[in-house]
Image (cartoon, rainbow, N blue to C red):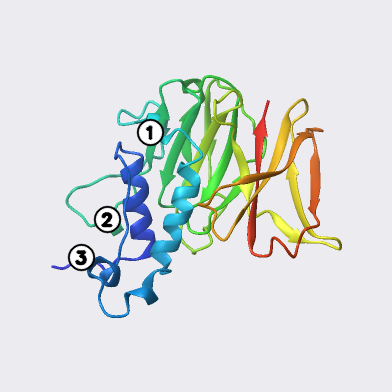
Amino acid sequence: MAGPVTTAPILRKQEYWALLSGAAGQLYGNHYTWQFASGWQNYLDTPGAIQMSYLEALFQTRAWYNLVPDTNHTVVTGGYGTSSSTVTVSTNDYAMAARTADGTLVMVYLPALRTLTVDMSKLSGPAVAQWYDPAGGSYVQISGSPFTNSGVRNFTPPGNNSNGDGGWVLLLETLSTPTPPVLGYQLAGPGTNGFVVSFNTLPGWKYELQSVSNSPAGVWFPLVTNIPGTGGPVQITDTNTLGRVGWFYRVRIGS
């Protein structure tokens, strides 16, 4: 019996399972681009290709090459679901987790909505916690973050992602990580004098507002640096709206 037609959620499972299981990378193509079939130029921006840019934007800013798969469930101790080699990808709901050996980063791909239980002691320090939407490339900060690196904690996704399914990536990043955590992008909204970026801050920490053109997988450059944390929300206005129409924004936390 033939398997199901490949969908965006199935592609996301294959992509994130691979990278969090120790794969050296991930490639994507479709019927037209694999063989340069007639009209292949019209199929370069398919949903599968677009979500690959979100995958790249997430992983390229983190030490993904140092991630060790959590095969023994020492990090995600509950809610990891079922993995089976006898059914199709579409019916597997396994939450693949991985952690860097220095305890500065934990990443978990959860393909279906449910609660994950994480042993926070596997992190080397207080950790910023976020959900990443792999279908839309946006972040959702988790209330109460950063969390201490002790005991166990439950994490439940905020609902369906922007594609309408339950796929999310849980990110746990210590404040001392060599690569400072990204606190999201596509945060800008139109204001009276430009694009307004709003984000919450921690007291005593510095933040940097960055921007990139066309695709979040591009090269980010700083717009505003050394933004002081107040322990509350901060708003930054980018008045160069004409020069940056269609650009993405993100905020990175530093020390």
To which residue does mark 2 refer? 89
To which residue does mark 3 refer? 3
Q: Label 3's element?
A: loop
Disc sitting over residue 190 in the figure: none
Q: CA distance from mark 2 to mark 3?
A: 9 Å
To which residue does mark 1 refer? 65
Residue 35 visible in the current orientation: yes
Q: Horizontal and vertical percent for residue 237? A: 80, 52
Q: Residues within 10 Å of mark 3 (few under 14, many from 20)?
A: few
Q: Horizontal and vertical percent for residue 110? A: 42, 46
Q: Amino acid at mark 3?
A: Gly
Q: Nearer the viewer, mark 1 or mark 3?
A: 1
| Residue at the farthest bottom position | 38
Q: Nearer the viewer, residue 75 or 237?
A: 237
Position of the C terminus, as image quadrant, is top right
Q: Nearer the viewer, residue 90 or 139?
A: 139
Q: Which quadrant of the structure image shows residue 23?
A: top left
| Residue at the farthest left position | 1
Q: Amino acid at mark 1?
A: Tyr
Q: Horizontal and vertical percent for residue 36? A: 26, 71
User: Is there CB contact under 8 Å for labels 2 and 3?
Assistant: yes
Q: Label 1's element?
A: helix
Q: Label 2's element?
A: helix
Q: Residues within 10 Å of mark 2 (few under 14, many from 20)?
A: some
For the point 38% across and 33% down, which residue is it? 65
